[in-house]
Amino acid sequence: MKENPNPDGPRAFEWIDDFVVPPMTGNPFEDADQQFVHGLLTSYFESDDERENRISRVLARFDNDQPAPGFGLKNSGMSRWITLSTAAMIILCLSSWICFQPSEALAALSRTLKTVEQNVTRIYEVRAESRTGQSIASRRALLTTHSGNEFVVEITDSPVQTLIGSNSKEQWVVRGERLWRSSDGNPFRPRELLLHLMTARQMNLNAMLTQIPGNYDIEVLPAQTIPGYEDLKTNPLLATLKTPNLRNPETIKFWPHPITRVAVRLELTMPRTLLFGGSNTIVADLKDEQPFAPETFEHSTYCIGCE
Amino acid sequence: LPGLSDRNRKLFELFVRENEGALITYLRSLVRDPGLVDDLFQETLVTAWRRFDDFDTSRPLAPWLRGIALNLVRNSRRKRAGDLLQIGDQVAMFIEQAVAKVEVVEADNWRDRLAILSHCVDTLTTRSKSLIRWRYSDGKTATQIASRLDESPASVRKQLQRIRATLLECIAQRLGEAAP
Protein backbone atom coordinates (compact mmCIF):
# COMPACT_ATOMS: atom_id res chain seq x y z
CA MET A 1 0.00 0.00 0.00
CA LYS A 2 1.47 3.32 -1.10
CA GLU A 3 0.56 6.77 0.04
CA ASN A 4 -1.44 8.75 -2.47
CA PRO A 5 0.83 11.69 -3.34
CA ASN A 6 -2.16 13.89 -4.01
CA PRO A 7 -4.68 13.28 -1.28
CA ASP A 8 -7.82 15.26 -1.83
CA GLY A 9 -7.49 17.33 1.28
CA PRO A 10 -7.55 17.07 5.04
CA ARG A 11 -11.33 16.76 5.24
CA ALA A 12 -10.98 13.27 3.86
CA PHE A 13 -9.93 11.94 7.25
CA GLU A 14 -12.04 14.06 9.56
CA TRP A 15 -13.74 10.89 10.74
CA ILE A 16 -10.47 9.61 12.12
CA ASP A 17 -9.51 12.74 13.96
CA ASP A 18 -12.82 14.38 14.81
CA PHE A 19 -15.48 11.68 14.67
CA VAL A 20 -17.62 13.46 12.14
CA VAL A 21 -19.25 12.16 9.00
CA PRO A 22 -16.62 10.23 7.13
CA PRO A 23 -16.13 11.45 3.57
CA MET A 24 -13.67 9.14 1.91
CA THR A 25 -11.01 10.02 -0.64
CA GLY A 26 -12.30 7.82 -3.40
CA ASN A 27 -8.89 6.19 -3.39
CA PRO A 28 -9.34 2.83 -1.66
CA PHE A 29 -5.58 2.40 -1.22
CA GLU A 30 -5.25 5.62 0.72
CA ASP A 31 -8.44 4.94 2.68
CA ALA A 32 -7.16 1.53 3.70
CA ASP A 33 -3.70 2.86 4.62
CA GLN A 34 -5.07 5.56 6.88
CA GLN A 35 -7.72 3.37 8.48
CA PHE A 36 -5.26 0.57 9.15
CA VAL A 37 -2.66 2.82 10.82
CA HIS A 38 -5.46 4.48 12.79
CA GLY A 39 -6.53 1.02 14.04
CA LEU A 40 -2.94 0.11 14.92
CA LEU A 41 -2.29 3.37 16.78
CA THR A 42 -5.54 3.10 18.74
CA SER A 43 -4.56 -0.39 19.86
CA TYR A 44 -0.95 0.59 20.51
CA PHE A 45 -1.92 3.38 22.89
CA GLU A 46 -4.65 1.42 24.65
CA SER A 47 -3.74 1.00 28.32
CA ASP A 48 -3.57 -2.38 29.98
CA ASP A 49 -6.56 -1.44 32.13
CA GLU A 50 -8.65 -0.56 29.10
CA ARG A 51 -7.67 -3.80 27.44
CA GLU A 52 -8.49 -5.89 30.50
CA ASN A 53 -11.82 -4.12 30.88
CA ARG A 54 -12.65 -4.91 27.28
CA ILE A 55 -11.79 -8.57 27.81
CA SER A 56 -13.78 -8.62 31.05
CA ARG A 57 -16.85 -7.39 29.20
CA VAL A 58 -16.57 -10.26 26.71
CA LEU A 59 -16.18 -12.77 29.53
CA ALA A 60 -19.18 -11.26 31.31
CA ARG A 61 -21.13 -11.63 28.11
CA PHE A 62 -20.05 -15.29 27.95
CA ASP A 63 -21.13 -15.81 31.55
CA ASN A 64 -24.52 -14.26 30.80
CA ASP A 65 -24.94 -16.75 27.99
CA GLN A 66 -24.76 -19.67 30.36
CA PRO A 67 -27.96 -21.41 31.48
CA ALA A 68 -29.75 -19.48 34.19
CA PRO A 69 -30.21 -21.39 37.46
CA GLY A 70 -33.71 -22.71 37.74
CA PHE A 71 -34.54 -22.30 34.07
CA GLY A 72 -32.30 -24.92 32.54
CA LEU A 73 -32.33 -22.86 29.36
CA LYS A 74 -29.75 -20.90 27.48
CA ASN A 75 -30.14 -17.17 27.68
CA SER A 76 -28.15 -16.88 24.44
CA GLY A 77 -26.29 -13.75 25.38
CA MET A 78 -29.28 -11.53 25.02
CA SER A 79 -29.54 -10.33 28.58
CA ARG A 80 -29.09 -6.70 27.68
CA TRP A 81 -31.88 -6.61 25.21
CA ILE A 82 -33.99 -8.82 27.45
CA THR A 83 -33.52 -6.14 30.08
CA LEU A 84 -34.60 -3.43 27.74
CA SER A 85 -37.47 -5.42 26.32
CA THR A 86 -38.75 -6.30 29.74
CA ALA A 87 -38.55 -2.68 30.75
CA ALA A 88 -40.43 -1.70 27.64
CA MET A 89 -43.11 -4.20 28.51
CA ILE A 90 -43.45 -2.65 31.92
CA ILE A 91 -43.98 0.70 30.26
CA LEU A 92 -46.62 -0.89 28.07
CA CYS A 93 -48.56 -2.03 31.06
CA LEU A 94 -48.63 1.11 33.10
CA SER A 95 -52.23 1.66 32.15
CA SER A 96 -53.32 -1.32 34.20
CA TRP A 97 -51.35 -0.09 37.16
CA ILE A 98 -52.92 3.31 36.90
CA CYS A 99 -56.53 2.23 37.18
CA PHE A 100 -56.14 0.55 40.57
CA GLN A 101 -54.57 3.37 42.54
CA PRO A 102 -56.36 5.53 45.14
CA SER A 103 -58.73 7.85 43.40
CA GLU A 104 -57.67 11.06 45.15
CA ALA A 105 -54.12 10.76 43.81
CA LEU A 106 -55.05 9.37 40.48
CA ALA A 107 -57.95 11.27 39.06
CA ALA A 108 -55.58 12.61 36.46
CA LEU A 109 -54.23 9.14 35.82
CA SER A 110 -57.60 7.78 34.92
CA ARG A 111 -57.63 10.31 32.12
CA THR A 112 -54.23 9.02 31.04
CA LEU A 113 -55.67 5.54 31.01
CA LYS A 114 -58.32 6.68 28.58
CA THR A 115 -55.60 7.90 26.23
CA VAL A 116 -54.04 4.45 26.33
CA GLU A 117 -57.32 3.04 25.08
CA GLN A 118 -57.41 5.36 22.07
CA ASN A 119 -57.12 3.68 18.70
CA VAL A 120 -53.71 5.12 17.80
CA THR A 121 -50.22 3.70 17.67
CA ARG A 122 -47.68 5.41 19.89
CA ILE A 123 -43.93 5.22 19.49
CA TYR A 124 -41.61 5.63 22.45
CA GLU A 125 -37.85 5.99 22.34
CA VAL A 126 -36.46 3.90 25.19
CA ARG A 127 -33.01 4.25 26.75
CA ALA A 128 -31.68 1.89 29.39
CA GLU A 129 -28.53 2.54 31.40
CA SER A 130 -26.86 -0.03 33.58
CA ARG A 131 -24.19 1.07 36.02
CA THR A 132 -21.78 -1.45 37.46
CA GLY A 133 -18.98 0.17 39.42
CA GLN A 134 -17.49 2.83 37.18
CA SER A 135 -18.76 1.37 33.95
CA ILE A 136 -21.99 2.35 32.26
CA ALA A 137 -23.60 0.23 29.58
CA SER A 138 -26.49 1.62 27.62
CA ARG A 139 -29.07 0.26 25.22
CA ARG A 140 -31.65 1.92 23.02
CA ALA A 141 -34.90 0.69 21.64
CA LEU A 142 -38.06 1.85 19.95
CA LEU A 143 -41.31 0.71 21.49
CA THR A 144 -44.30 0.81 19.15
CA THR A 145 -47.49 0.08 20.99
CA HIS A 146 -51.19 -0.01 20.30
CA SER A 147 -52.47 -2.08 23.19
CA GLY A 148 -51.28 -4.54 25.74
CA ASN A 149 -50.95 -7.34 23.22
CA GLU A 150 -50.04 -5.33 20.15
CA PHE A 151 -46.53 -4.00 20.28
CA VAL A 152 -43.09 -4.14 18.70
CA VAL A 153 -39.83 -3.54 20.53
CA GLU A 154 -36.86 -2.89 18.27
CA ILE A 155 -33.41 -2.86 19.83
CA THR A 156 -31.94 -0.05 17.78
CA ASP A 157 -28.28 -0.26 18.80
CA SER A 158 -27.83 -3.98 18.38
CA PRO A 159 -25.42 -4.95 15.61
CA VAL A 160 -27.97 -7.55 14.60
CA GLN A 161 -31.57 -6.62 13.76
CA THR A 162 -33.54 -7.56 16.86
CA LEU A 163 -37.28 -7.18 17.30
CA ILE A 164 -39.84 -8.62 19.68
CA GLY A 165 -43.44 -8.34 18.60
CA SER A 166 -46.90 -9.37 19.54
CA ASN A 167 -50.34 -9.18 17.96
CA SER A 168 -53.68 -10.81 18.57
CA LYS A 169 -52.52 -14.04 16.85
CA GLU A 170 -49.01 -14.66 18.09
CA GLN A 171 -45.81 -13.45 19.67
CA TRP A 172 -42.66 -13.37 17.60
CA VAL A 173 -38.96 -12.62 17.81
CA VAL A 174 -36.75 -11.60 14.89
CA ARG A 175 -33.01 -11.87 15.44
CA GLY A 176 -30.90 -11.27 12.33
CA GLU A 177 -32.55 -13.41 9.69
CA ARG A 178 -34.06 -15.84 12.17
CA LEU A 179 -37.70 -15.80 13.14
CA TRP A 180 -39.38 -17.45 16.10
CA ARG A 181 -43.17 -17.55 16.27
CA SER A 182 -45.32 -18.77 19.12
CA SER A 183 -47.90 -19.94 16.58
CA ASP A 184 -45.46 -22.50 15.18
CA GLY A 185 -46.45 -24.71 18.06
CA ASN A 186 -42.82 -25.28 18.92
CA PRO A 187 -41.33 -23.97 22.11
CA PHE A 188 -39.12 -20.92 21.73
CA ARG A 189 -35.65 -22.35 22.09
CA PRO A 190 -33.26 -21.14 23.23
CA ARG A 191 -34.82 -17.70 23.49
CA GLU A 192 -37.91 -18.93 25.25
CA LEU A 193 -36.58 -17.40 28.44
CA LEU A 194 -37.18 -14.00 26.94
CA LEU A 195 -40.78 -14.70 26.12
CA HIS A 196 -41.38 -16.49 29.38
CA LEU A 197 -40.16 -13.41 31.16
CA MET A 198 -42.41 -11.13 29.23
CA THR A 199 -45.50 -13.24 28.89
CA ALA A 200 -45.40 -14.19 32.55
CA ARG A 201 -46.21 -10.69 33.67
CA GLN A 202 -45.44 -7.68 31.60
CA MET A 203 -47.21 -8.65 28.42
CA ASN A 204 -50.33 -9.92 30.10
CA LEU A 205 -52.50 -6.98 31.05
CA ASN A 206 -54.93 -9.07 33.05
CA ALA A 207 -52.13 -10.51 35.13
CA MET A 208 -50.85 -7.02 35.79
CA LEU A 209 -54.28 -5.92 36.90
CA THR A 210 -54.37 -8.57 39.56
CA GLN A 211 -50.80 -8.19 40.79
CA ILE A 212 -50.04 -4.48 40.85
CA PRO A 213 -52.79 -2.97 43.00
CA GLY A 214 -51.48 -1.99 46.39
CA ASN A 215 -47.85 -2.57 45.51
CA TYR A 216 -46.88 1.09 45.14
CA ASP A 217 -47.00 4.25 47.24
CA ILE A 218 -47.98 7.07 44.98
CA GLU A 219 -47.48 10.81 45.21
CA VAL A 220 -48.26 13.66 42.92
CA LEU A 221 -45.16 15.84 42.56
CA PRO A 222 -45.06 19.62 42.20
CA ALA A 223 -45.44 20.91 38.66
CA GLN A 224 -42.27 20.54 36.60
CA THR A 225 -41.27 21.27 33.04
CA ILE A 226 -41.55 18.11 30.99
CA PRO A 227 -38.05 17.14 29.86
CA GLY A 228 -37.81 17.82 26.17
CA TYR A 229 -40.91 20.01 26.16
CA GLU A 230 -39.89 23.61 26.75
CA ASP A 231 -42.41 25.77 28.60
CA LEU A 232 -44.75 22.83 29.15
CA LYS A 233 -45.36 22.04 32.83
CA THR A 234 -47.26 19.21 34.41
CA ASN A 235 -47.52 17.36 37.71
CA PRO A 236 -45.49 14.15 37.41
CA LEU A 237 -46.50 11.13 39.43
CA LEU A 238 -44.00 9.12 41.43
CA ALA A 239 -44.78 5.56 42.46
CA THR A 240 -42.49 3.75 44.90
CA LEU A 241 -42.63 -0.01 45.33
CA LYS A 242 -43.75 -0.85 48.87
CA THR A 243 -42.02 -4.20 49.12
CA PRO A 244 -38.98 -4.57 46.88
CA ASN A 245 -39.04 -7.60 44.64
CA LEU A 246 -37.17 -8.67 41.56
CA ARG A 247 -40.06 -8.30 39.15
CA ASN A 248 -41.35 -4.77 39.49
CA PRO A 249 -39.62 -1.42 38.99
CA GLU A 250 -38.55 0.14 42.28
CA THR A 251 -39.88 3.53 41.21
CA ILE A 252 -41.97 4.70 38.31
CA LYS A 253 -42.21 8.37 37.47
CA PHE A 254 -44.20 9.69 34.58
CA TRP A 255 -45.26 12.98 33.07
CA PRO A 256 -48.77 13.18 31.59
CA HIS A 257 -49.23 15.85 28.97
CA PRO A 258 -51.18 18.68 30.68
CA ILE A 259 -53.75 18.86 27.90
CA THR A 260 -53.90 15.48 26.18
CA ARG A 261 -53.02 13.49 29.35
CA VAL A 262 -50.91 11.13 27.25
CA ALA A 263 -47.85 9.87 29.15
CA VAL A 264 -45.08 11.70 27.30
CA ARG A 265 -42.18 10.60 29.48
CA LEU A 266 -41.59 7.72 31.85
CA GLU A 267 -38.61 7.03 34.10
CA LEU A 268 -38.17 3.67 35.78
CA THR A 269 -35.57 2.47 38.23
CA MET A 270 -35.18 -1.27 38.03
CA PRO A 271 -34.28 -3.67 40.84
CA ARG A 272 -30.73 -4.93 41.15
CA THR A 273 -30.77 -8.52 40.07
CA LEU A 274 -28.53 -10.94 38.28
CA LEU A 275 -30.48 -10.20 35.15
CA PHE A 276 -30.42 -6.46 35.45
CA GLY A 277 -26.90 -6.12 36.88
CA GLY A 278 -26.09 -2.97 38.86
CA SER A 279 -28.25 0.11 39.23
CA ASN A 280 -30.43 0.57 36.20
CA THR A 281 -32.60 3.29 34.85
CA ILE A 282 -34.95 3.25 31.91
CA VAL A 283 -36.30 6.39 30.29
CA ALA A 284 -39.01 6.39 27.63
CA ASP A 285 -40.01 9.47 25.63
CA LEU A 286 -43.04 9.66 23.41
CA LYS A 287 -41.83 10.37 19.89
CA ASP A 288 -44.83 9.97 17.63
CA GLU A 289 -48.46 9.02 17.29
CA GLN A 290 -49.74 7.34 14.15
CA PRO A 291 -53.03 5.90 12.92
CA PHE A 292 -53.39 2.26 13.86
CA ALA A 293 -52.24 -0.14 11.13
CA PRO A 294 -52.41 -3.88 11.93
CA GLU A 295 -49.41 -4.70 9.74
CA THR A 296 -47.19 -2.68 12.07
CA PHE A 297 -47.39 -5.61 14.47
CA GLU A 298 -46.75 -8.39 11.93
CA HIS A 299 -43.28 -9.96 11.71
CA SER A 300 -43.53 -10.01 7.90
CA THR A 301 -43.28 -6.22 7.91
CA TYR A 302 -39.75 -6.40 9.33
CA CYS A 303 -38.37 -9.72 8.22
CA ILE A 304 -39.08 -10.71 4.64
CA GLY A 305 -38.00 -14.24 3.89
CA CYS A 306 -36.89 -15.02 7.43
CA GLU A 307 -36.58 -18.64 8.39
CA LEU B 1 -20.88 -32.82 33.42
CA PRO B 2 -19.50 -31.31 36.60
CA GLY B 3 -16.80 -28.78 35.81
CA LEU B 4 -17.61 -28.65 32.11
CA SER B 5 -18.83 -25.07 32.24
CA ASP B 6 -15.64 -24.03 34.10
CA ARG B 7 -13.56 -25.67 31.44
CA ASN B 8 -15.58 -24.01 28.67
CA ARG B 9 -15.11 -20.66 30.31
CA LYS B 10 -11.36 -21.12 30.57
CA LEU B 11 -11.18 -22.20 26.95
CA PHE B 12 -13.24 -19.22 25.92
CA GLU B 13 -10.96 -16.87 27.85
CA LEU B 14 -7.91 -18.37 26.15
CA PHE B 15 -9.68 -18.03 22.81
CA VAL B 16 -10.43 -14.36 23.54
CA ARG B 17 -6.94 -13.49 24.78
CA GLU B 18 -5.28 -15.19 21.85
CA ASN B 19 -7.34 -13.35 19.25
CA GLU B 20 -8.46 -10.06 20.77
CA GLY B 21 -5.54 -7.88 19.67
CA ALA B 22 -5.74 -8.45 15.94
CA LEU B 23 -9.53 -8.47 16.02
CA ILE B 24 -9.90 -5.17 17.86
CA THR B 25 -7.34 -3.52 15.58
CA TYR B 26 -9.29 -4.76 12.57
CA LEU B 27 -12.60 -3.48 13.95
CA ARG B 28 -11.10 -0.12 14.89
CA SER B 29 -9.95 0.19 11.29
CA LEU B 30 -13.49 -0.30 10.05
CA VAL B 31 -15.76 1.36 12.62
CA ARG B 32 -15.40 4.79 14.16
CA ASP B 33 -17.81 4.61 17.13
CA PRO B 34 -15.83 3.10 20.06
CA GLY B 35 -19.04 1.83 21.68
CA LEU B 36 -20.03 0.05 18.51
CA VAL B 37 -16.52 -1.37 18.16
CA ASP B 38 -16.91 -2.84 21.63
CA ASP B 39 -20.32 -4.33 20.78
CA LEU B 40 -19.04 -5.82 17.54
CA PHE B 41 -15.95 -7.17 19.28
CA GLN B 42 -18.13 -9.04 21.78
CA GLU B 43 -20.60 -10.18 19.16
CA THR B 44 -17.82 -11.52 16.92
CA LEU B 45 -16.16 -13.57 19.63
CA VAL B 46 -19.39 -14.94 21.04
CA THR B 47 -20.75 -15.73 17.56
CA ALA B 48 -17.51 -17.48 16.62
CA TRP B 49 -17.60 -19.50 19.81
CA ARG B 50 -21.17 -20.59 19.08
CA ARG B 51 -20.28 -21.51 15.50
CA PHE B 52 -17.07 -23.27 16.34
CA ASP B 53 -18.38 -26.51 14.87
CA ASP B 54 -18.47 -24.77 11.47
CA PHE B 55 -14.78 -23.82 11.63
CA ASP B 56 -12.54 -25.71 9.21
CA THR B 57 -9.51 -26.60 11.31
CA SER B 58 -7.33 -26.93 8.23
CA ARG B 59 -7.58 -23.15 7.78
CA PRO B 60 -6.23 -20.33 9.97
CA LEU B 61 -8.54 -19.10 12.69
CA ALA B 62 -7.90 -15.34 12.60
CA PRO B 63 -9.17 -14.67 9.05
CA TRP B 64 -12.29 -16.70 9.86
CA LEU B 65 -12.88 -14.46 12.87
CA ARG B 66 -12.41 -11.35 10.77
CA GLY B 67 -14.87 -12.71 8.23
CA ILE B 68 -17.49 -12.98 10.96
CA ALA B 69 -16.60 -9.49 12.16
CA LEU B 70 -16.90 -8.01 8.68
CA ASN B 71 -20.36 -9.55 8.21
CA LEU B 72 -21.46 -8.04 11.50
CA VAL B 73 -20.02 -4.65 10.49
CA ARG B 74 -21.90 -4.80 7.21
CA ASN B 75 -25.15 -5.72 8.98
CA SER B 76 -24.65 -2.80 11.35
CA ARG B 77 -23.96 -0.43 8.51
CA ARG B 78 -27.43 -1.01 7.11
CA LYS B 79 -28.89 0.46 10.27
CA ARG B 80 -26.28 2.96 11.37
CA ALA B 81 -24.71 4.38 8.26
CA GLY B 82 -23.77 7.58 10.03
CA ASP B 83 -21.65 5.76 12.58
CA LEU B 84 -19.70 3.55 10.25
CA LEU B 85 -17.21 3.97 7.52
CA GLN B 86 -18.31 3.52 3.97
CA ILE B 87 -16.45 0.27 3.62
CA GLY B 88 -15.82 -0.76 0.07
CA ASP B 89 -14.83 -4.32 -0.69
CA GLN B 90 -11.35 -3.17 -1.66
CA VAL B 91 -10.81 -1.23 1.56
CA ALA B 92 -11.96 -4.17 3.65
CA MET B 93 -9.70 -6.51 1.70
CA PHE B 94 -6.64 -4.27 2.06
CA ILE B 95 -7.19 -3.89 5.78
CA GLU B 96 -7.63 -7.62 6.13
CA GLN B 97 -4.34 -8.19 4.33
CA ALA B 98 -2.55 -5.52 6.35
CA VAL B 99 -3.68 -7.00 9.68
CA ALA B 100 -2.71 -10.44 8.44
CA LYS B 101 0.81 -9.17 7.64
CA VAL B 102 1.30 -7.94 11.18
CA GLU B 103 -0.11 -11.18 12.47
CA VAL B 104 2.73 -13.23 11.00
CA VAL B 105 5.42 -11.20 12.78
CA GLU B 106 7.10 -13.60 15.15
CA ALA B 107 6.16 -12.65 18.69
CA ASP B 108 4.30 -14.14 21.62
CA ASN B 109 1.23 -11.97 21.27
CA TRP B 110 -0.33 -9.04 19.46
CA ARG B 111 1.00 -6.57 22.00
CA ASP B 112 4.55 -7.67 21.26
CA ARG B 113 3.88 -7.53 17.52
CA LEU B 114 2.95 -3.87 17.94
CA ALA B 115 6.57 -3.25 18.95
CA ILE B 116 7.08 -2.82 15.23
CA LEU B 117 4.98 0.33 15.53
CA SER B 118 6.84 1.43 18.65
CA HIS B 119 10.08 1.60 16.68
CA CYS B 120 8.39 3.65 13.95
CA VAL B 121 6.87 6.10 16.43
CA ASP B 122 10.34 6.59 17.91
CA THR B 123 11.63 7.75 14.51
CA LEU B 124 9.09 10.60 14.33
CA THR B 125 9.99 14.19 15.09
CA THR B 126 9.22 15.49 18.57
CA ARG B 127 6.30 17.48 17.25
CA SER B 128 4.85 14.49 15.38
CA LYS B 129 5.23 12.33 18.47
CA SER B 130 3.35 14.94 20.47
CA LEU B 131 0.55 15.08 17.92
CA ILE B 132 0.22 11.30 17.91
CA ARG B 133 0.26 11.11 21.69
CA TRP B 134 -2.36 13.82 22.07
CA ARG B 135 -4.56 12.15 19.49
CA TYR B 136 -4.19 8.51 20.52
CA SER B 137 -2.94 8.42 24.09
CA ASP B 138 -4.92 11.40 25.40
CA GLY B 139 -7.86 10.87 23.05
CA LYS B 140 -7.99 14.49 21.88
CA THR B 141 -9.72 15.36 18.62
CA ALA B 142 -8.02 17.34 15.89
CA THR B 143 -10.13 20.32 16.86
CA GLN B 144 -8.97 20.14 20.48
CA ILE B 145 -5.35 19.76 19.43
CA ALA B 146 -5.71 22.70 17.04
CA SER B 147 -7.06 24.83 19.84
CA ARG B 148 -4.08 23.92 21.98
CA LEU B 149 -1.62 24.77 19.20
CA ASP B 150 -3.55 27.78 17.96
CA GLU B 151 -3.76 26.25 14.52
CA SER B 152 -6.67 25.31 12.31
CA PRO B 153 -8.28 21.86 12.73
CA ALA B 154 -7.76 21.26 9.01
CA SER B 155 -4.03 21.82 9.42
CA VAL B 156 -3.85 19.38 12.34
CA ARG B 157 -5.84 16.78 10.42
CA LYS B 158 -3.47 17.11 7.50
CA GLN B 159 -0.44 16.71 9.77
CA LEU B 160 -1.94 13.61 11.38
CA GLN B 161 -2.71 12.21 7.97
CA ARG B 162 0.91 12.68 6.91
CA ILE B 163 2.22 11.17 10.12
CA ARG B 164 0.08 8.07 9.59
CA ALA B 165 1.40 7.81 6.04
CA THR B 166 4.99 8.10 7.33
CA LEU B 167 4.31 5.47 9.95
CA LEU B 168 2.86 3.16 7.34
CA GLU B 169 5.98 3.43 5.20
CA CYS B 170 8.08 2.59 8.23
CA ILE B 171 5.81 -0.30 9.18
CA ALA B 172 5.86 -1.68 5.64
CA GLN B 173 9.66 -1.55 5.68
CA ARG B 174 9.86 -3.26 9.06
CA LEU B 175 7.35 -5.89 8.00
CA GLY B 176 9.46 -6.59 4.92
CA GLU B 177 12.49 -7.10 7.16
CA ALA B 178 10.48 -9.22 9.56
CA ALA B 179 8.88 -11.38 6.88
CA PRO B 180 9.74 -15.02 7.36
Image: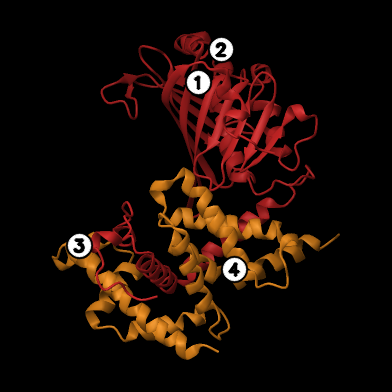
Chain colours: A red, B orange
When the figure is inspected, residue A92 is found, relative to residue A292, above or below; the finding is below
Q: Which comes before the other along the chain, label 2 or label 1?
A: 2
Mark 2 and mark 3, same subunit? no
Task: Choose mark 2 or mark 1, whichever is in front.
Answer: 2
Q: Position of residue A98 (x, y in %)?
A: 54, 16
Q: Give the labeled residue for mark 2.
A: A99
Q: Residue at x 44, y 70 (%)?
A: A43
Work out how far the residue at label 4 is from the one at label 1, CA to CA, in angstroms: 57 Å
Q: Position of residue A225 (x, y in %)?
A: 31, 25
Which quadrant holds residue B145? bottom left
Q: Is residue A241 visible?
A: no
Q: Give the labeled residue for mark 1.
A: A218
The amino acid on which the numbered mark 1 sits, given as a three-letter code, is Ile
Q: Residue at x 76, y 46 (%)?
A: A69
Q: Chain of mark 2?
A: A
The numbered mark at residue B154 is 3
The amino acid on which the numbered mark 2 sits, given as a three-letter code, is Cys
When the figure is inspected, residue B57 is found, relative to residue A186, above or below; the finding is below
Provide the secondary structure element on which disc 3 rests.
Answer: helix
Task: Choose mark 4 or mark 3, whichever is in front.
Answer: 4
Q: Residue at x 26, y 67 (%)?
A: A7
Mark 4 and mark 1, same subunit? no
Provide the secondary structure element on which disc 2 rests.
Answer: loop
Q: Give the labeled residue for mark 4.
A: B63
Work out how far the residue at label 2 is from the one at label 1, CA to CA, in angstroms: 13 Å
Task: Choose mark 3 or mark 1, whichever is in front.
Answer: 3
Work out how far the residue at label 4 is from the one at label 2, CA to CA, in angstroms: 58 Å
Work out how far the residue at label 2 is from the one at label 3, CA to CA, in angstroms: 59 Å
How many neighbours does mark 1 have within 10 angstroms: few (below 14), some (14-19), or many (20 or more)?
many
